[in-house]
Amino acid sequence: MPKRPCAVTLTPDEKTILCGDKFGDVYALPLHPTEADNYILPPYRKLDEDHESRSSTLVPSANTRTVHTLRNQKALKDQLSSANRKVPPKAPTFENQLLLGHVSLLTDVACVAVSGEVATTSHDRTYIITADRDEHIRVSRGMPQAHVIEGFCLGHTQFVSKLCVPSWDPRLLVSGGGDDHLVVWDWLAGRILQRFDLRKHVSDFIDHYYDSPHLLGHDPMDRDTVHASHTKIAVRELHAAEARTTTGAPRRYIVVVIEGLPAVFLFHIAEDGAMQQEAAIATGGNVVALTVSRSQNRIAYGLDTVHKCFSQSEVSNKNSRSTTAMIEILDFSARAEAWKRDMDGLLQAINFAVENFPSDTGQVRESGDLLYGLENLRKRGQEE
């Protein structure tokens, strides 16, 4: 890609990949790309290549008559040799199309197809919803009219890191980021349906965690330190799940992960978009990734086995790391109408690899910068 990707999704017909990058641009790529030999780079890409070719043949203004010291002579020799070296083109060699762009760092992208009745048009229509660091959620038309902006959903006071459109009701949008709350939208109208206080549930979970001795593990952090370090929160994962009870009735949930917390939050969402907490399930470590199965009755999530629970920098002791699973699964019990942790044979085999995690302290500490980065999106000096 031209720049580093940060968000990827499929169009509703599952034929096109939408890829957003850190510079705020969204590209379209075919899921089954054209053969490289048959693909012709667009004209503006060729201009980039010509520019690179011209810049690679520039001759330094200095010469052997104006350079006298050994160090400068060596530097001049290196410049002359590099001037004749061919610079590989930066343009991608696969089919891609620039659809739209933000002036801020893009954080997430979603693509939604709605019927003509919902979109108040004579035909079905596709929309691209994008979020950025500047608290904006933009609603654009789908391909090939992605340059047309339909509207904005404005209401966040911090960066927006995640978007979620439930499959059972494409009119709803749930968004979260560096605020203390989740926001439920009627995104076509740009109207807020509910602000859901997330910070309160995080604080309650921390107290519950420390009031439950079986959850504390080998080397827990101090409770007051944990509360102090989570006065600001950031939504890391946001998904929708629709499970079925024994009677076939749907149970609809919004699944949330907060960066640096050993928990999966499950919130029940009603047809009108109103949410209430269903459960906060403690995990064996900070959750760093989560996905919902296609059947939507199973949730799998990956854990940070290196750092202490609630911490993004303090390394846990070796005994704690060796007993922490890398992946855990929640299954929906249709009879009990609740989510329960499960561990099958495949998971046990995968988690066996945790013993091969780096034990060198330097390597372990460097992993914190790779696993946690949402707080870098928060603007310095901005009032909370």
Image (cartoon, rainbow, N blue to C red):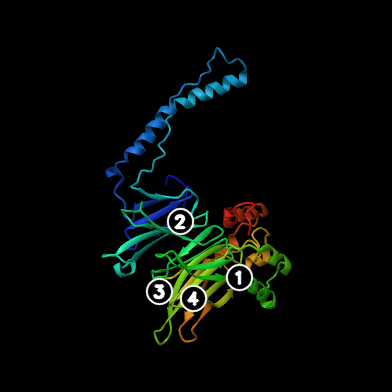
Going by the numbered disc 1, the residue's amino acid type is Gly
Mark positioned earlier in the residue sequence (2 or 4): 2
Q: Is residue 123 left or right of residue 202?
A: left
Q: Nearer the viewer, residue 149 or 10?
A: 149
Asked if labels 4 and 2 touch by Cβ distance under 8 angstroms, the answer is no
Cα gap from disc 2 to disc 3, whole angstroms: 23 Å
Residue at image x 61%, y 21%? 71
Q: CA distance from mark 3 to mark 1?
A: 25 Å
Front-most of residues 231 and 122: 122
Q: Which residue is mark 3?
A: 295
| Vertical order, 142 against 23 (above or below) | below
Is 220 rendered above or below residue 149?
Answer: below
Question: Reading the chain from its start, which is encountered first: label 4 or label 1?
Answer: 4
- Regarding residue 89, the answer to whether it shows in the image is yes
Quadrant into which the C terminus falls: bottom right
Identify the residue position indicated by label 4 in the image. 274
**Residue 290 seen from this side:** no
What residue is disc 2 on?
A: 7
Q: Nearer the viewer, mark 2 or mark 3?
A: 2
